[in-house]
Amino acid sequence: MSPALNKDFNNAPKQIGVDPLKFTTWLFIVSICMMFGAFTSAYIVRQSEGNWQQFDYPQGLLYNTIFIVLSSVTMQWAYIAAKKDNLKALKAALFITFALGIAFLLGQWGVWSELVQNKIFFGGATANPSGSFMYVLTGVHGFHLITGLVFLIIVLLLAFKFKVHAKSLLRIEMCTTYWHFLTALWLYLYLFLIAYK
């Protein structure tokens, strides 16, 4: 390469790439937002068509809301601990977050069991459409929470291998972002269900 071309090459603006993990995580979040936007829009449209039977929501929904909000707090604690290289606190916070995530899922199972006991079923010609939407909204969110728990396990295993610390924050940063998103999504769904009951 000639000196002139070499000089131009060195002075050229450097391309800033997007990390594939960040890109994938945000793409996943955007797609989930679009999906739940479609679900909640369909809920409002279907409600206006009639044959919409109201029912009392199980108290477990409130407890699950508390569980997931607390898990978001402990997830943020884990991220802060990683930034400070406090590996003991990092592992503890990740464990607690995982336990709260499991508590949320078990709580959801309890909610669905109570719905069944109250003869509120999913689908079918005689099913209450409001009950069917309840199963869809909470069930699909629960599925995505399971994906968050898988992500959390990966980060926890990396923490035990000393691969999550102040100089290696990408994975825990993305896990924290996704977990906070799941919490925000649940709060949206919870408030939506109350407002459009």
Image (cartoon, rainbow, N blue to C red):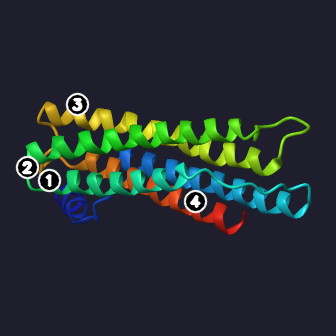
The correct choice, above or below, for 118 with respect to 8 in the image is above
Q: Which numbered disc flags the more N-terminal residue, 2 or 4?
A: 2
| Residue annotated with mark 1 | 81
Distance between the alpha carbons at the discs numbered 2 and 3 = 16 Å
Relative to 113, is 125 on the left or the right? right
SS at circle 2 = loop
Q: Which numbered disc flags the more N-terminal residue, 1 or 3?
A: 1
| Residue annotated with mark 2 | 86
| Type of amino acid under label 2 | Asn
SS at circle 4 = helix
> Marks 2 and 1: in contact by CB < 8 Å?
yes
> Marks 3 and 2: in contact by CB < 8 Å?
no
| Residue annotated with mark 3 | 157
Tell me the residue at 26%/43% (across/down).
96
Distance between the alpha carbons at the discs numbered 1 and 3 = 16 Å
| Residue annotated with mark 4 | 190
Neighbor class of circle 1 (other Cα within 10 Å; few <14, some 14-19, many 20+) is many
Distance between the alpha carbons at the discs numbered 2 and 4 = 35 Å
| Type of amino acid under label 4 | Tyr
